[in-house]
């Protein structure tokens, strides 16, 4: 690049930039950028670990990082000692994922932990979502970035039952995962090494037979999209290599790494209009935003819009998993440095989007909702207020009108006018929010048109955006 280009590269956001750039240089840069995206050919998947509070999500995540060489022996020994000092011997693997003091003292994951590992064919980002009831909103932000879910279930006597009964997190997390677009689920039956279980086939089968109807009712196609497998997260059995027949004679299926490798991933369009919901932002030599690309590609030097406030910005640098890259495509978790906007003018839930086809910003939309479980004595009717979670947006909303009820059997609208609905109903309604939010129709962009409604810390409904007001 000549000096001229460099000077213009730093030009003020308000200035018009010269239109002509040496065509050959552009062609060369494009080819290079293309090549760079080619070299990242290993497919990239986000995996979220979900499940009840003590099912062993962080321990399993920690063990994966250890087995795939992301954490060395010395670190593990250090954690083992720390856990012993706090007389929490079996938590040491979880320390790999739970890095802050609060989490270690309580033994609970609060933020969504993040870590990376690779298998033969795939680069993975692990999102270790918290399982404790009061942290469900954090679990939502984890699951909304995930392509596949690993549902960790404890086989220990009594622990599976607690997680599964009403009010247990296993149920709520599965329903949330489905709405948030986690299409594939690996159900990992953990703690098989526990003295109460001892790799018992009966116990494993019992858990599988109790979970299957529930997974079906949450909308999963169990034959196609769900796979069960037994592991021990603490000992690492059946994770990187298949479990030894001397320990578990009846298991002939894959180990966890093999199962993760075989999962087919959803296709996203690298040439579609650019969409990256912003999860977080901070100051670092300019304004940096974090999020996952849901559609399209982004390159250094691109001009984009921050929606809904239509701020024009320029991409100064793109980082993917700590590495600076020139371009990045869909499915990647990025940090993007922007010029032309102050950090305080961005809220999480805003969306970085293409200028040509910006994401719609609306205060009202039509949606199809499935009511899961209303609070005691509540009825769902016009005027109902809840908290709406859609990609990284959290916003208060009100149901302004129920339009029609859908018959769950025929999936067709019922004739009679609907004034209120109860648990289990599917209903089309108009939803209103106080501030402008960025959403898409589910049929155009599933990831940006799926949402959950929560009241008093409980998920009461899941839904999809079916129609937006004409702009």
Image (tube, helix red, strand yellow):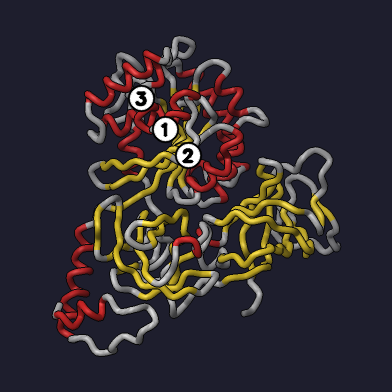
Residue 232: image location, x then y, percent: 38, 22
Q: Nearer the viewer, mark 3 or mark 1?
A: 1
Q: Residues within 10 Å of mark 2 (few under 14, many from 20)?
A: many
Name the one closer to the observer, 365 or 111. Answer: 111
Q: Earlier in the sequence, mark 2 or mark 3?
A: 3
Q: Residues within 10 Å of mark 3 (few under 14, many from 20)?
A: many
Q: Residue at x 45, y 15 (%)?
A: 200
What is the quadrant of the N terminus in the image?
bottom left
User: Disc 1, disc 2: CB below 8 Å?
Assistant: yes
Tag 3's secondary structure?
loop
Identify the residue under disc 3: 93
Q: Residue at x 20, y 63 (%)?
A: 36
Tag 1's secondary structure?
loop
Q: Nearer the viewer, mark 2 or mark 3?
A: 2
Q: Residue at x 45, y 61 (%)?
A: 343
Q: Is residue 442 left or right of residue 411?
A: left
Mark on residue 111?
A: 2
User: Disc 3, disc 1: CB below 8 Å?
Assistant: no
Identify the residue under disc 1: 100
Say if residue 297 shows up in the picture.
yes
Q: Nearer the viewer, mark 1 or mark 2?
A: 1
What is the quadrant of the C terminus in the image?
bottom right
Q: Quadrant of residue 113?
A: top left
Residue 366: image location, x then y, percent: 68, 66
Q: Marks 2/3: CA distance?
A: 17 Å
Q: Is residue 185 left or right of residue 440?
A: left
């Amino acid at each position: 690049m000549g000096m001229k280009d460099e000077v213009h590269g730093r030009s003020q956001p308000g200035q018009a930039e010269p239109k002509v750039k040496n065509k050959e240089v552009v062609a060369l840069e494009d080819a290079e950028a293309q090549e760079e995206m080619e070299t990242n050919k290993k497919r990239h998947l986000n995996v979220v670990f979900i499940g009840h509070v003590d099912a062993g999500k962080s321990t399993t995540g920690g063990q994966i990082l250890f087995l795939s060489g992301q954490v060395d022996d010395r670190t593990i020994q250090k954690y083992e000692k720390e856990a012993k000092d706090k007389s929490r011997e079996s938590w040491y693997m979880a320390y790999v994922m739970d890095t802050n003091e609060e989490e270690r003292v309580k033994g609970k994951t609060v933020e969504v932990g993040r870590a990376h590992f690779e298998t033969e064919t795939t680069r993975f980002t692990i999102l270790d979502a918290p399982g404790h009831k009061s942290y469900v909103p954090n679990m939502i932000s984890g699951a909304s970035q995930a392509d596949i879910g690993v549902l960790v279930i404890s086989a220990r006597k009594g622990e599976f039952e607690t997680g599964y009964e009403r009010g247990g997190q296993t149920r709520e997390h599965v329903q949330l995962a489905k709405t948030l677009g986690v299409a594939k689920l690996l159900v990992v039956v953990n703690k098989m090494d526990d003295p109460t279980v001892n790799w018992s086939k009966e116990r494993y089968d019992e858990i599988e037979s109790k979970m299957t109807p529930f997974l079906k009712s949450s909308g999963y196609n169990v034959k196609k999209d769900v796979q069960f497998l037994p592991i021990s997260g603490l000992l690492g059995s059946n994770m990187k290599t298949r479990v030894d027949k001397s320990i578990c004679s009846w298991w002939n299926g894959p180990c966890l790494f093999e199962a993760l490798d075989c999962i087919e991933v959803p296709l996203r369009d690298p040439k579609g209009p650019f969409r990256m919901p912003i999860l977080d932002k901070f100051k670092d030599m300019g304004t940096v935003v974090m999020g996952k690309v849901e559609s399209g590609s982004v390159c250094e030097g691109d001009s984009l819009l921050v929606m809904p406030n239509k701020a024009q910005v320029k991409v100064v640098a793109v980082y993917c998993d700590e590495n600076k890259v020139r371009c990045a495509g869909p499915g990647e978790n990025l940090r993007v440095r922007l010029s032309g906007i102050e950090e305080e003018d961005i809220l999480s839930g805003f969306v970085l989007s293409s200028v040509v086809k910006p994401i719609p910003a609306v205060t009202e939309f039509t949606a199809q909702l499935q009511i899961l479980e209303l609070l005691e004595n509540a009825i769902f009717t016009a005027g109902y207020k809840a908290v709406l979670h859609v990609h990284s947006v959290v916003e208060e909303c009100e149901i302004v009108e129920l339009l029609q009820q859908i018959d769950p059997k025929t999936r067709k609208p019922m004739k009679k006018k609907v004034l209120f609905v109860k648990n289990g109903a599917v209903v089309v309604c108009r939803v209103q929010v106080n501030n402008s939010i960025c959403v898409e129709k589910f049929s155009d962009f599933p990831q940006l048109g799926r949402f959950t409604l929560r009241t008093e810390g409980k998920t009461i409904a899941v839904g999809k955006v079916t129609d937006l007001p004409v702009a």
